[in-house]
Image (spheres, rainbow, N blue to C red):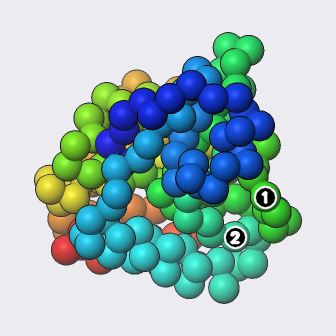
């Protein structure tokens, strides 16, 4: 989702003000996320559905949409909201301390790929092990793994897998963006 700084607020105000529920908090600034389009919402629902189906067969965690994740970056706190994520282990109540094991971001038309990849750097610095950056207009997915020299590009006809996070998971790019 694209972003624009709204204003500087304290963490307490960010967490308690319902107006910021769909915003991130970076460097003391509330960052408003773009309102997703129908396509964005459809892809978000497809991702969640596929992951819920996998986890119904292997109950090792849960799927969340726009879960507030409290991340530590260089001694500073940031709150990010991945479009979809998988957290292994017990259910999350409230916000998550750290990053989930898998994060998915769906690029909106006014998002830059570099800004989206920067979010994954935050996630990886806090324990995330697998990221998918879905590029709807390109009908492709960038598969990001911490420490990898470059993302893998998956296109229509290709399958995405859950790696070591969700072994045996296989989802086609077509089923998400087709």
Pointer 2 local density, CA inside 10 Å: few below 14, some 14–19, many at least 20: many
Of residues 153 and 24, the one nearer the viewer is: 24
Residue at (31%, 29%) from the top-left corner? 114
Provide the residue designation for mark 1.
Answer: 94
Mark 1 vs mark 2, CA separation in Å: 14 Å
x%, y% of residue 86? 63, 61
Q: Is 136 on the left or on the right of 10, as rendered?
A: left
Residue at (66%, 21%) from the top-left corner? 73
- Mark 1 or mark 2: name the one nearer the start of the chain: 2
The image quadrant of residue 122 is top right
Residue 74 position (above or below residue 123): above
Residue 34 position (above or below residue 74): below
Looking at the rendered structure, the secondary structure element under dot 1 is loop
Residue at (49%, 80%) from the top-left corner? 49
Task: Point out which mark residue 66 bears.
Answer: none
Q: Can residue 113 be seen in this snapshot?
A: yes
Residue 15 position (above or below residue 139): above
x%, y% of residue 47? 44, 71
Pointer 1 local density, CA inside 10 Å: few below 14, some 14–19, many at least 20: few
Provide the residue designation for mark 2.
Answer: 62
Quarter occupied by the C terminus? bottom left
Q: Mark 1 near mark 2, Cβ–Cβ under 8 Å?
A: no
Residue 118 position (above or below residue 16): above
The image quadrant of residue 27 is top right
């Amino acid at each position: 989702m694209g972003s624009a700084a709204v204003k500087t607020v304290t963490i307490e105000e960010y967490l308690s003000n319902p107006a910021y529920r769909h915003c991130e908090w970076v460097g003391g600034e509330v960052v408003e996320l773009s309102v997703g389009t129908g396509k964005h919402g459809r892809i978000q629902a497809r991702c969640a559905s596929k992951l819920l189906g996998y986890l119904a067969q292997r109950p090792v965690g849960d799927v969340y949409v726009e879960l507030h994740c409290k991340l530590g970056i260089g001694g500073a706190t940031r709150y990010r909201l991945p479009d979809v994520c998988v957290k292994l282990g017990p259910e999350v109540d409230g916000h998550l301390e750290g990053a989930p094991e898998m994060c998915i971001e769906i690029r909106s038309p006014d998002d830059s790929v570099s800004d989206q990849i920067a979010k994954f750097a935050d996630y990886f610095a806090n324990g995330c092990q697998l990221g998918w950056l879905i590029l709807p207009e390109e009908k492709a997915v960038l598969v990001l793994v911490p420490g990898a020299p470059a993302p893998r590009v998956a296109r229509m006809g290709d399958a995405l897998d859950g790696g070591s996070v969700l072994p045996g998971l296989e989802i086609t790019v077509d089923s998400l963006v087709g």
